[in-house]
Amino acid sequence: MNPDPMNPDPMDDEPFLAVVGMAGRFPGARDLDEFWSNLTKGQDSITRFPGNSADYPDYVPAIGLLAGSEDFDAEFFGYSHREALILDPQHRLFLECAWEAMEDAGYDPKAYPGPVGVYAGSSQTGYFEALMANRDNLGPVSEWQLRLATGIDFLTSRVSFKLGLTGPAVTVQTACSTSPTATTSGRCCAAPRSTTTVSTRSASPPPASAARPR
């Protein structure tokens, strides 16, 4: 660590981290401003449903719902409607937030002089299994295409490819510490760092001909 924090040495072995842009989606909040507003008002953003089960007395019919989770702009990111349909919802959300974070920071990846990397992690959702169980609704799509669209290992490389980033793309998986590990991993001039966790319903996806992500 440089002994003079007011005059940091760029060659110091201790890396410096500056948060210059942020983006996020949360239950009851479409962005960070709305999330902060909910926090300051003490607003409960958990959606509760009527009824409970006598067989499961500890079961609480409540969950955090993401508004607008179906509004993925497939065309903007260069996806066909079928490609967007089979893309894991966590990957869609992370791609949108990575773009928004870069915008919030005022960085253009194509004009930025240094490498821009991605460090992030996600969880398993069961979306692949749901797609496999309903392949008749998806049109001509292979199992390998479904694995590419839903695998957690492709989270960061997909963002790098779609946003034209040239730095490292590192998928981080360290259980409950994935988020802080992703935040402090690696050295790069600029990098979206985050985690994403979205639970999906096990209901059948709509036919590909009917799927129209925005």
Image: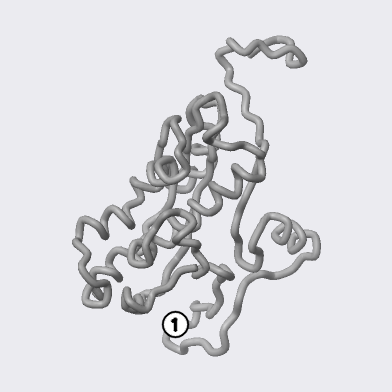
Identify the residue under disc 1. Answer: 56
Q: Quadrant of residue 111?
A: top right
User: x and y percent of residue 212 in the render?
Assistant: 43, 73
Determine whether 117 is above or below 48 in the image: above
Query: At 48% across and 28% down in the image, what residue appears?
Result: 186
**Residue 68 location, quadrant:** bottom right
Residue drawn at point x = 46 percent, y = 54 percent:
77
Residue 167, compared with residue 12, is above or below; it is below
Whether residue 117 is visible to the viewer of this picture, yes or no, is yes
Q: SS at mark 1? A: loop
Rendering coords of residue 18 (x, y %): 66, 31
Q: Residue at x 54, y 47 (%)?
A: 98
Between residue 175 and residue 146, name the one nearer to us.
146
Colour mode?
Answer: one colour
| In this rendering, position of residue 65 left or right of residue 156 | right
Q: Residue drawn at (66%, 58%), measured in percent from left and top?
A: 31
Residue 81 screen position, x and y as percent: 38, 66
